[in-house]
Image (spheres, rainbow, N blue to C red):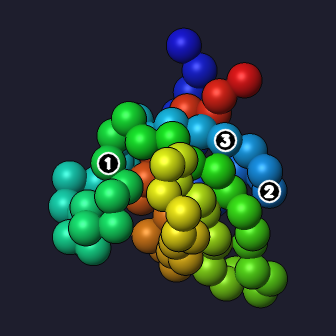
Amino acid sequence: MSQHQSINQLRKGETATIVGYLADEIPIKIYEMGLLPGVVLTLKRQAPFNGPVCIHIRDNPNAIALRRSEAALILIETLS
């Protein structure tokens, strides 16, 4: 089993599955955006200068932008 990392550690184009959260208390907006364990996502873009990350959730036509601080709370496992 590989070690879990956060969304911030993905490279552009990499795909991963959400496996959990770093903290017990997660902002409700994370759940409302559909970022739940088991969801498969792909990193589309990373804004420079510590700006937001843009992800795409499988089977959802919309892109989601997350602050880096929020993305750091979401633990993932990369797909090979």
Residue at 77% over, 86% down: 49
Q: CA distance from mark 1 to mark 2?
A: 21 Å
Of the residues shown, which amino acid type is indicated by label 2?
Lys
Residue 21 or residue 28, whichever sits in front: 28
Crowding at mark 2 (Cα within 10 Å: few <14, some 14-19, many 20+):
some
- How many numbered badges does the structure rendering display? 3
Across and down, in percent, residue 77 comes to: 55, 33
Q: Quadrant of residue 7?
A: bottom right
Under tag 3, what secondary structure? strand
Q: Residue at x 43, y 53 (%)?
A: 74
Real-space CA distance between mark 3 and mark 1, rounded to the nearest whole angstrom: 15 Å
From what the image shows, is residue 57 above or below residue 80? below
Q: From the viewer's perspective, tell me whether residue 18 is left or right of residue 49.
A: left
Q: Which mark is residue 36?
A: 1
Amino acid type indicated by mark 3: Thr
Residue 20 in picture, x, y percent from top left = 35, 41
Residue 41: x and y in percent read 56, 48
Q: Secondary structure at mark 2?
A: loop
Relative placement, left or right, of 36 versus 16 is: left
Query: Along the line of sight, which residue is nearer the eye, 42 or 2?
Result: 42
Mark seen at residue 12: 2
* Label 1 packing within 10 angstroms: few (<14), some (14-19), many (20+): some
Tell me residue 18's x, y (percent): 44, 41
At 59% from the left and 59% from the top, the residue drawn is 56
Residue hosting label 3:
15
Q: CA distance from mark 2 to mark 3?
A: 9 Å
Q: Earlier in the sequence, mark 1 or mark 2?
A: 2
Among the two numbered marks 3 and 1 on one chain, the one whose residue lies closer to the N terminus: 3
Whether residue 72 appears in this view of the structure is: no
Relative to 40, say whether 45 is above or below. below
